[in-house]
Image (cartoon, helix red, strand yellow):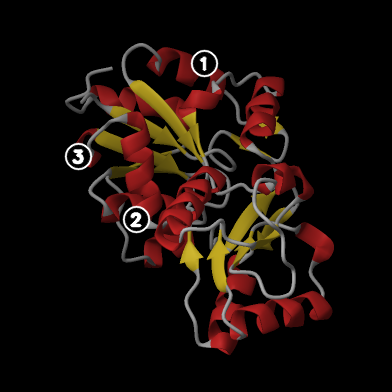
């Protein structure tokens, strides 16, 4: 097993539809010297769309280098089917772009075996919240594609779906299965996907909780970038201490030259 660098996407490589300065050149410098992988909690677009979006910003990655919560959810649904001897019914409460990713499962919006919850933007309203509450309260398992607290946009921070996931957990006295960062299972699945050990791997991200805390909990080294949702006062107060801190991704090659990686 060799070494691996996992990159977060939104806030680390780009914000909204704009690549951060110097990202493409930094990735090109790292390629060939170390294996690169890309993981994200972004669930408004599927993997094909994300690769195309990055390409439109001048950031070239392949689908094989990307691991998402949707892919982790597929693994869970397959395991559920093996355990129970049938295909689970689901309510895919996800962005339109992800509906096709769950097209092979029977849809039941009233009493599904599993509710799959992702980013749905402005679709939230009180009727939908109560519908979701009723399903989970009556026994449907809630799978959340992630549980981010907030995310960075061109106009500032906005509350993320962690707001709704935590609320449904509270009112139903249940626990959602979290598929994305900072879930230990998600990081372990990503490491298995890229065939690398945690001790030889780095996680680069702007979220001290999901990116750095999640990665370091499974034995990876976390490098915090001061872009995207990074806020110094929040990070200073956190009990999570990154292995390294850099202004942005362009400083990563120099940081790694001082490690055993030797870029």
Identify the residue under disc 3.
Answer: 199
Neighbor class of circle 2 (other Cα within 10 Å; few <14, some 14-19, many 20+) is some
Neighbor class of circle 3 (other Cα within 10 Å; few <14, some 14-19, many 20+) is few
Q: Which mark is residue 222?
A: none
Front residue of this view, candidates 261 and 215: 215
Front residue of this view, candidates 253 and 232: 253
Going by the image, does 242 lie left or right of 141?
A: left
Q: Image quadrant of residue 51?
A: top right
Asked whether residue 248 appears in the rendered view, the answer is no
Neighbor class of circle 1 (other Cα within 10 Å; few <14, some 14-19, many 20+) is few
Mark earlier in primary sequence (3, 1): 1
Mark earlier in primary sequence (1, 2): 1
The residue depicted at 49 percent of the width and 25 percent of the height is: 64
Front residue of this view, candidates 111 and 74: 111
Q: In this rendering, is residue 198 above or below 259?
A: below
Q: Image quadrant of residue 114?
A: bottom right
Viewer-nearest of discs 1 and 2: 2
Identify the residue under disc 1.
Answer: 25
Asked whether residue 222 appears in the rendered view, the answer is yes
Where residue 153 appears, as percent x and y from the top left, is 70, 49
Mark earlier in primary sequence (3, 2): 2
Q: Which mark is residue 184?
A: 2
Front residue of this view, candidates 16 and 138: 138
C-alpha distance separating marks 3 and 1: 26 Å
Q: In this rendering, is residue 85 above or below 72?
A: below
Locate the N terminus and report the quarter of the image it occupies: top left
């Amino acid at each position: 097993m060799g070494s691996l660098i996992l990159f977060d996407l939104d806030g680390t490589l780009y914000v909204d539809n704009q690549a951060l300065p110097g990202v493409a050149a930094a990735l090109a410098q790292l390629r060939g010297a170390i294996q690169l992988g890309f993981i994200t909690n972004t669930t408004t677009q599927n993997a094909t769309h994300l690769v195309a979006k990055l390409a439109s910003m001048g950031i070239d990655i392949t689908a094989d280098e990307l691991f998402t919560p949707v892919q982790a959810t597929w693994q869970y649904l397959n395991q559920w089917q093996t355990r129970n001897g049938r295909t689970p019914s689901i309510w895919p409460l996800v962005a339109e772009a992800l509906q096709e990713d769950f097209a092979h499962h029977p849809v039941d919006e009233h009493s599904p075996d599993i509710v799959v919850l992702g980013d749905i933007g402005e679709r939230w309203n009180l009727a939908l919240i109560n519908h979701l509450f009723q399903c989970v309260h009556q026994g449907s398992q809630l799978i959340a594609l992630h549980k981010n607290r907030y995310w960075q946009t061109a106009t500032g921070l906005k509350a993320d779906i962690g707001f709704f996931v935590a609320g449904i957990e509270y009112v139903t006295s249940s626990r959602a299965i979290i598929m994305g960062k900072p879930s230990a299972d998600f990081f372990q699945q990503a490491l298995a996907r890229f065939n690398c050990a945690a001790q030889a791997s780095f996680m680069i991200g702007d979220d001290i909780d999901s990116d750095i805390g999640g990665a370091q909990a499974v034995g990876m080294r976390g490098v915090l970038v001061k872009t995207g949702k990074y806020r110094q006062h929040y990070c200073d107060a956190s009990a999570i201490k990154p292995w390294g801190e850099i202004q942005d991704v362009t400083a990563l090659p120099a940081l790694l030259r001082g490690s055993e990686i030797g870029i």
